[in-house]
Image: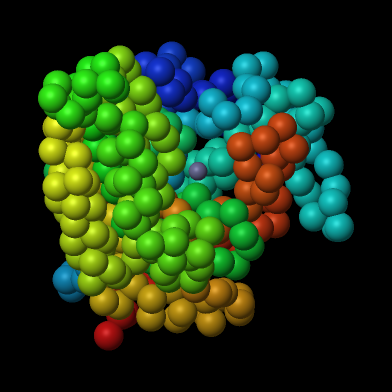
Amino acid sequence: MLATFIKYASIDSQSDDETPWPCTAGQLEMAQAIAADVKQAIDKSCVREASVEVSADGYVYVRIPSNIKSECPSLGISCHLDVTPEAKGGNIKPIVDLLNGHTVVRTDGSTLLGADDKCGVTIAVELIRTVLLTPTIKHGNLFFVFCPNEDVGRAADKIDATAFCPDILFDLDGEEFGVITKSNFTARRFDVKFIGHDAHPGDAKAQKYGDAIAAAAAYVSYFPVECRPENSEGKQGYIHPWNFAKEGVDVTVNSRVRYFDKSEGELFDRMLAGAIADVGRKFPNVKIEVVADELQYENVAYTLHPQAQLLVENAASKVGMDIKFADERGGTTSAMMAARGLKGGMCVFAGMHNVHSTREYADIHEMEEAYSLMLEVIKEIPILK
Ligand SMILES: [Zn+2]
């Protein structure tokens, strides 16, 4: 586990916010390194039908066919091979250290480590090796995907849903030890443009002055303060107008819409439509256009396999691990995939800490725990009742 992690962490696979596609050369190098390790394991094994493929966009797809006669749900494991552009990357030199009796890997603090998500990648590759090289492990159809551009929110943009189509999905990309995310926000981007009409204020009425700034301000203040992010917690959602972009006499208001429950989402839809209609009545000389209404990620809970939670609970009790299920007030890779119509998956802790910073580190013990849990999940599926 340690050697594999250090090898992957040393590859500079930062994603790029400005030009996500084609993905960066570092991500392609990382994809090739993963594929080479998987290919070596396939060649060593007697599983001739197993396959590994790197797509032109930098995704790595691995498929290991079932080795049992009976039918059972297929399992997919995802992770991401890029690291965030939010902290300094480049020449990453992993340093092995000891922290509270655990082997940890960090850097000297001048760059990030990329534990997010080289931890998930390492665990997934070790699972592939173990399954391929241990014929006594009985399992159903297994799919793995290593995605590029996750940290710039685009992991699902070019995913091939025919190469990765599991019934039950887990994403190895969580931070807090023992925590498994079973639901998350549905996230929408909602941008409204207020198109103004300039005129001299002294003659504004006759010249049909359309004040886009006033209209945009009325739109923002239409939403009750109870719906704002600072008043939202737990599984409550929010509407967050977060930016005014002025261009000439026009103003665009960018908003984030977040919710767990579909009924709250419908309430927010009515509010947004109500705000536009109300402002339109009050400012008839301002033209209002919805310029973006985009689903960015979806609550995985809507499409989770009904037995996914039981499966993890059974696996955790077999390996003697305490786990905690959580609701994430944010998104995950699975949530991006769910927004593209794939099934939702839980996000599993992977041993990373202080992510997106130069203080980032990986805890090898926690990675081994996540590995044991997922290996048990693989073994549990064929006996799932
Ligand atoms: Zn991540």
Q: Nearer the viewer, residue 199 or 239?
A: 199
Report which quarter residue 8 is drawn in: top right
Q: What is the x, y in percent for residue 318?
A: 53, 80
Report which quarter residue 19 is drawn in: top left
Q: Residue at image x 81%, y 28%?
A: 108
Residue 118 is left or right of residue 157, and the answer is right
Q: How many numbered circles does the render carry?
A: 0
Q: Nearer the viewer, residue 267 or 342?
A: 267
Residue 86 is left or right of residue 70, and the answer is right
Residue lying at the far front in this picture: please name it: 202
Residue lying at the far bottom in this picture: please name it: 385
Q: Is residue 90 above or below residue 285?
A: above
Q: Quadrant of the N terminus?
A: top right
Q: What is the x, y in percent for residue 214?
A: 33, 36
Colour mode? rainbow
Q: What is the x, y in percent for residue 96?
A: 79, 38
Q: Is residue 226 visible?
A: yes
Residue 8 is left or right of residue 211, and the answer is right
Q: Is residue 49 above or below residue 33?
A: below
Report which quarter residue 210 is drawn in: top left
Q: What is the x, y in percent for residue 125?
A: 47, 43
Q: Is residue 170 above or below residue 199?
A: below
Q: Nearer the viewer, residue 332 or 343?
A: 332
Q: Quadrant of the C terminus?
A: bottom left
Q: Residue at image x 30%, y 28%?
A: 251
Q: Nearer the viewer, residue 328 or 36?
A: 328
Residue 34 is left or right of residue 191, and the answer is right
Q: Residue at image x 60%, y 75%?
A: 321
Q: Is residue 276 visible?
A: no
Q: Residue at image x 60%, y 67%?
A: 178
Q: Is residue 130 above or below residue 203?
A: below
